[in-house]
Image (cartoon, coloured by chain):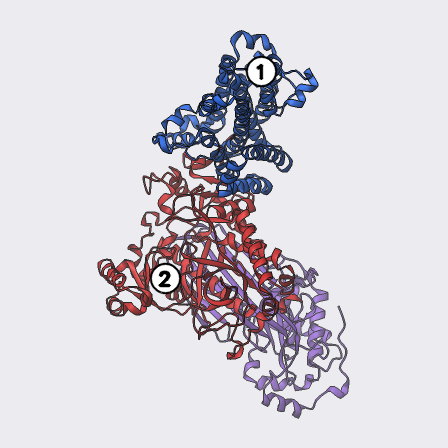
Amino acid sequence: MPTPPSPSNSDASSLAEILAAVEQGESIVHGSPDRQQIFRIFHRTVYTYGEKARRSTNEVRLTPKENPWQKVTFFLLTIRPATHVKQFRDLHGNNVHHFEITENHSRLVIEAQSIVRKTCKVDFEAFPYGSPMDALRECRRIDHCHEFLEPSHFIEVTPDIWRAAVDARGLSEDVFQTAYNIMTFVYKRFGYVPGATHVGTSAMEAFKAKSGVCQDFAHVMIAMCRALGIPARYVSGYLFDPAHDDLRGTQASHAWVEIFVLGRGGWFGLDPTNNKVVDEHYVSVATGRDYNDVSPARGTFFGGGAHRTLDVTVSVDRAE
Amino acid sequence: MLFDSYKTDGFFDEMFGNGGGDAPRDHYGQIWDRFSVMNDEELQGKKGALDRSFLVNGITFTVYSDNAGTERIFPFDPIPRIIPPSEWETVETGLIQRITALNLFLYDVYHEAKIVKDGIVPMDIIESAEHYRPEFKGLNLPNDVYIHICGTDLVRDDKGDYLVLEDNGRCPSGVSYVLENRAAMKRTFPRLYGNMNVRPVDDYPLQLLQTMRYVAPHGKTDPVCVVLTPGVYNSAYFEHTFLARQMGIELVEGRDLVAVDGHVYMRTTKGLVHVDVIYRRLDDDFLDPTVFRKDSMLGVPGIVEAYRRGNVALCNAIGAGVADDKVTYAYVPDMIRYYLDQDPILNNVPTYLAWREEDRKYILENMESLVVKAANESGGYGMIIGPKATKEEIATFRERVKATPRNYIAQPVVSLSRHPTVCENGKAEGRHVDLRPFVLYGDRVRVLPGGLTRVALRKGSLVVNSSQGGGSKDTWVLRSSLGES
Amino acid sequence: MLSRVADSLYWMSRYIERAGNIARLVEVNMEVLLDLSLEQQGSRESYWYPLLDATALTEKYQALEDESKRPEVPEFLTLSLENPDSIRSCIAQARENARMVRDQISDEMWLELNSLHLFLSSPAAAALWHRDPEDFCTQIIRFSLLFQGITDATIPHDEGWQFIRTGRFLERADKTTRILDIPHRLQSGRGPLPWATVLSSCSARAAYRQLYGGEVTERLATNLLIFSDVFPRSVRFCLRMVDEALHAISGTPRGQYSIEAERLTGSALASLDFAGPDEVEMMGLPAYADQLQTKFNDIGQQVFATYVLLPSEVALQITEQQRLVYAYTSQSQQQ
């Protein structure tokens, strides 16, 4: 993994400059438009019930997000058994599909397919250095940052996590550099062990276990960032592995972290599971404070019996 | 030269009209370069070579109204139709959206009929559809697929927008011409083809086979799949043979199959072999003389019972025709909104239903300017084009519409786009075209890049059907340069 | 393989062999007619009737209602569509069978057969027939040989090919006996019988010369065309091929039998093994040929019964309705 170049002091901006940039809007980042990709994504979730289920109410978050670096040219959500589907946006701007299946059914299939045009937000020639750690307190005043500093359903900052964050920061005075250090810390100190945790494991539990899957890696990194006052949010999505590098998280949906870099373009993605700065191969679907805000499918139902199985298929391919 | 006196005559022309002018569109640049310099001799040579290769290869179809066994080649025009990647993306995603909605609708219609309960589609419409099979309500099909293979007819209007003319969800034919046209074009224009970065079509048979395997009963992983043909006198027999051969599976006729105790077998020289999935090129009516038409010699007695018991899968499913009824068609945009909560990517041609009183009034008063179609006839039969019909024909259709309003719909005359087509005099003239892409609904939904472009060869004609003076063109969908990285 | 496919391959092959042999028959007859004296030429039409007899077509010919529109016999045998066994009809039926199994045969086979069919349906065929009937026959014979060569060289020698072989050799055995039969049917005490012509019609001139020298006798010609173990158009050779093919299909070792057709073939072959020209002379060639033809028919029917009509498993469960369908389809193939 390449070590990013350290920021030279001359890059550091004054607080005033940064606040001015915030005023002008954060998202003016040109990134690397030449690194364009088109992906076809297919995501099928099949629930099979041992006994008939009924009166099931569901919410799914499977539509890739729209932003200047990610255009969704096609999206289709298919629910079987066929039923009426309605969509809306949640508080975090994620697209949510809602549906009910009242009749008895022994299988529920949720299929999402999309075509997404991607470019890369971050410029790999020039990472968004230059936002000093000192300026972080300003973030508390920014509405859309505030909630990503507070504790959330799965994430609380404990003294142990705080100590680890301080260790990981080292001597860094730069926000992006610090977050990068935390990512590497998590990547190196934690074991990628599918099955070691479950969908309800909190950041604290994962931190103690020192192992988990992408969800846990992301939770721990978010907790560490928040411990140092860096706004950090949870992203669910997909990862395309261009070189068949055995990247983690390409078999199913993936999760990573976005941190807010004040005055340098806002939210940037870091993937602690693979120790990578998020590039055009990452397709984000939903963002939130933690997994609880973005779970791809959740719902309630009656019946269904004790034996329930879940089968997930994800494929991300370059389109022709 | 070929395009010397070419006129677009105010129609939307596929090839000419770049930026509103007369120049060839950008994606036709290489076609222009190649064809405009061709002299008569070379052109006739190429055309002759193409025709001969079709005839000698036996790529023919049989005409129904003629004596049995009259074979013709499907006339072929050498100038290919070009579809640029961005345009194709609209067509492709629109078709995926549409077939998905149709399959959800079919599942719903044969189960809870929520779309009826919620007041979106009237029950009368479904119950009166000729191909509705209420006796199959509640039957669960492997992976809930009803239409596995769909051939949707698209046209382009005077602005160049693609519109859906009809969905063929029973036994759409023509895909073999797509593959054979392509093979012939590659032989005849190898360099042009090579330079244009065209998306290939040859893996269709393999994908069709995968589509069939996906719906194998009981999740069988190595199912026996067959193509069921009505026989050698069917107009599309060549296609049935072609597909079976390309897929490497047996081409069977009804008499090759036997249903015993709810299972279907084929009769082989080594005894009976169990059959799991049948791509049937036979309408519901002829499938099983014990259930449907008693006089059918083409079907297999007992096959429907095996299907009911889930021991054999049929592609497409029995009763899928309710979705390609021309009245149901009018409700497809509503289905897309209901099941998918999206707007249709491809629009319908505006449609009046004689079944609705106010529409019927409109149809009867404006028949001279409308296209009136019987709801359940395919192949261009049972329709009139108002502006071209005689007074008598209009009078007859008026009576028919009054007598069985459920059976008729009307649409404004869409001025189909035109495409330069080589005519008898060796010059290119604009002829109306449509497009029939083929969609496979299996593990994934796949759209064959391109499809069959049909040409109404008679000057001014809007009828593209092979049985009524239509021809075809190869359809080239270009690769986006972006996907090349 | 599908029973129907086996059936179609078998009939495709039979019809092509039949077309070739009819051409051979017509050729012999024409040669014979050339040698007739002028006064006999006056009634040349009557010299064709024996050929109708030999091919069991007399009834069909006479059944043609309108005598004035009835084609002449040679035309009836070659280009007439009224005759289901004319060369043109044979090729059309061979093609129809091939069309039904288009996915089982090679493109080369199809192209060759389809081109001949298109030619025979075109005015050019009639023109050639009227201008140069001999050339017409030669072309048909050449086609059937070519087609068989293409067949052997372009498709796998598997089950389907064995059915093709069964059809080819059964038909050839049958027609060889009919060609042999002609001189006797033509005979009315006028001049020597045209055995040399018969031999060349069977492409057997060279083989005969090598074996027996220049002089052609009935006894030796019969010996070659019925009993030779090495000449590929002799009855015995053909039956051996049928026997081989049937055993290859069923997987039963040669010398044993598992189905009726194998038993009949074996028995016919055995009787040829222990017979010779003396037996033929004793019975008379026409009668001898007749009893062979009956055996060939029986073998053909048994092949059909075993592999096409009623595989044993279905026999028990088949419904009456299906029986009707099968009876209908089998009729359309049997002549």
Q: Give the farthest residue toward the bottom.
A: A16
x and y, in percent, of residue B198 in the image: 60, 62
Would you name the residue on which mark 2 appears?
A: B329
Q: Which chain is red?
A: B
Q: Tell if the residue under mark 1 belongs to the same chain as the one under mark 2.
A: no
Q: Secondary structure at mark 1?
A: helix
Residues C48 and C237: in front is C48
Q: Quadrant of residue A100?
A: bottom left
User: Does residue A235 lie above or below B70 as drawn?
Assistant: below
Q: Which chain is purple?
A: A
x and y, in percent, of residue C14 in the image: 52, 29
Q: Which mark is residue C269?
A: 1
Amino acid identity at mark 2: Tyr
User: Does residue B170 lie above or below B387 as drawn?
Assistant: above
Quadrant in which the N terminus of chain A appears:
bottom right
Residue placed at 51% from the left, 72% from the top? B5
Residues B238 and A19: in front is B238
The residue carrying pointer 2 sits among few (fewer than 14), some (14 to 19) or many (20 or more) residues within 10 Å by Cα, namely many
User: Does residue B382 lie above or below C143 as drawn?
Assistant: below
Chain letter for the residue marked with disc 2 in the picture: B
Q: Secondary structure at mark 2?
A: helix
Colour in which chain C is shown? blue
Query: Is B328 left, or right, of A91 in this rendering?
Result: left
